[in-house]
């Protein structure tokens, strides 16, 4: 093979490889933003749960459950992780209901039985969070309101801030979409992640109408006006503990930092129910029970 033919062949192989990578990145992007609709049905619980439909400012219709509690003085809103639905938060619903709280669970848009065309990593889902808060306040105007949110739910709650809530629990929440993409791709593609990450992030604007600079939950930490608890697994590769700590450091006081040793990007309640109860329940009690000091000493 002549030198000229060699370089022509090399160029074609390179071009085909780049086209393959670009197509693969586009298909991966399609999977990531695709809706996760499914029939949720009705929960089989030992306390009454009522179906509701909420109107999000985005135009989506949000499927919800409401569980009242006898003599409740506060409501806890539960926000699920990505590609999940409100059933993922049923364990927490049982825990908080038994603790005396009314509970609201929603399907974020493009999840479960809520409408919506795309998953937007918290950017549009933030309107669903605001709708849930308004719904809870309209149901029980005298109640204090808390939010317990995992992963995508936490990002949406941050992007919706400031919210009219009295306590906020954030579990395993990503710091920026750049960090989230790099972390996840590094787990699957190794060194290729440095090439694939920009290709995925570039798709945000043409496909979702949002730029990576607008998907930075960490930048909204200063907007939180309520006490916040941030929890993370210490071997979480989706949101490494060092990144989660940045969220905590950016938060206003009062705030509390909780590490689940040995936990990856797990359901933290399922992973260690004892620790979850010992850390999260006292935090909510401190700020949601009438008569408690809302400006209590922060736990660092």
Image: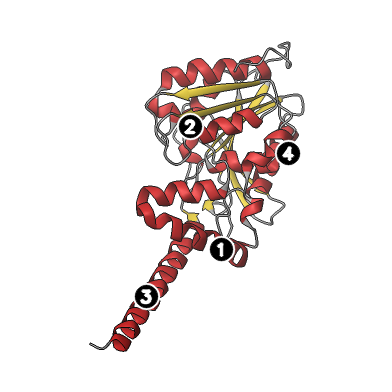
Q: Is residue 221 left or right of residue 142?
A: left
- Location of residue 300 by image quarter: top right
The quadrant of the picture occupied by the N terminus is bottom left
Labels 4, 2: front one: 2
Tag nearer the camera, 1 or 4:
1
The residue furthest front is 3
Residue designated by label 1:
202
For disc 3, the marked residue is 14
- Rounded to the nearest whole Å, what is the CA distance between mark 4 and mark 2? 33 Å
Residue extending furthest toward the left: 1
> Circle 4 sits on which residue?
134
Disc 1 to disc 2, how far (Cα)?
27 Å
Q: Residues within 10 Å of mark 1 (few under 14, many from 20)?
A: some
Task: Identify the residue at image location x=45%, y=46%.
Answer: 183
Residue 233, visible in the rendered structure:
yes
Name the side, left or right, on which 284 lies relative to 2.
Answer: right
195 left or right of 173 in image: left
Q: Residue at x 67, y 41 (%)?
A: 219
Alpha carbon of mark 3 to alpha carbon of mark 1: how far?
21 Å
Label placed on residue 214: none
Mark 3 near mark 4, Cβ–Cβ under 8 Å? no
């Amino acid at each position: 093979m002549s030198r000229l033919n060699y370089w022509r062949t090399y160029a074609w192989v390179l071009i085909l490889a780049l086209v393959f990578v670009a197509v693969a990145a586009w298909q991966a992007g399609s999977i990531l933003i695709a809706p996760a609709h499914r029939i949720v049905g009705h929960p089989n619980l030992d306390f009454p749960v009522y179906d509701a439909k909420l109107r999000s400012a985005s135009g989506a219709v949000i499927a919800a459950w409401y569980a009242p509690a006898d003599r409740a003085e506060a409501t806890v809103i539960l926000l699920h992780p990505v590609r999940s639905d409100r059933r993922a938060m049923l364990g927490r619903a049982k825990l908080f209901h038994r603790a005396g709280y009314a509970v609201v669970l929603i399907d974020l848009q493009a999840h479960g039985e809520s409408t919506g065309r795309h998953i937007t990593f918290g950017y549009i889902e933030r309107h669903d969070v605001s709708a849930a808060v308004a719904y809870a306040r309209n149901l029980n105007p005298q109640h204090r309101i808390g939010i317990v949110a995992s992963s995508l739910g936490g990002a949406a709650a941050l992007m919706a801030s400031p919210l009219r809530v009295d306590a906020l629990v954030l579990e395993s929440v990503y710091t920026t979409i750049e960090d989230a993409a790099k972390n996840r791709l590094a787990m699957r593609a190794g060194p290729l992640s440095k090439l694939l990450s920009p290709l995925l992030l570039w798709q945000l604007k043409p496909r979702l109408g949002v730029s990576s600079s607008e998907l930075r939950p960490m930048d909204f930490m200063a907007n939180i006006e309520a006490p916040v608890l941030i929890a993370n697994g210490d071997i979480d590769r989706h949101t490494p503990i060092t990144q989660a700590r940045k969220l905590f450091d950016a938060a206003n006081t009062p705030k509390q930092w909780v590490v689940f040793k040995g936990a990856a990007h797990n359901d933290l309640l399922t992973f260690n129910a004892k620790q979850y109860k010992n850390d999260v329940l006292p935090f909510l009690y401190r700020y949601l029970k009438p008569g408690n000091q809302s400006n209590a000493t922060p736990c660092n």
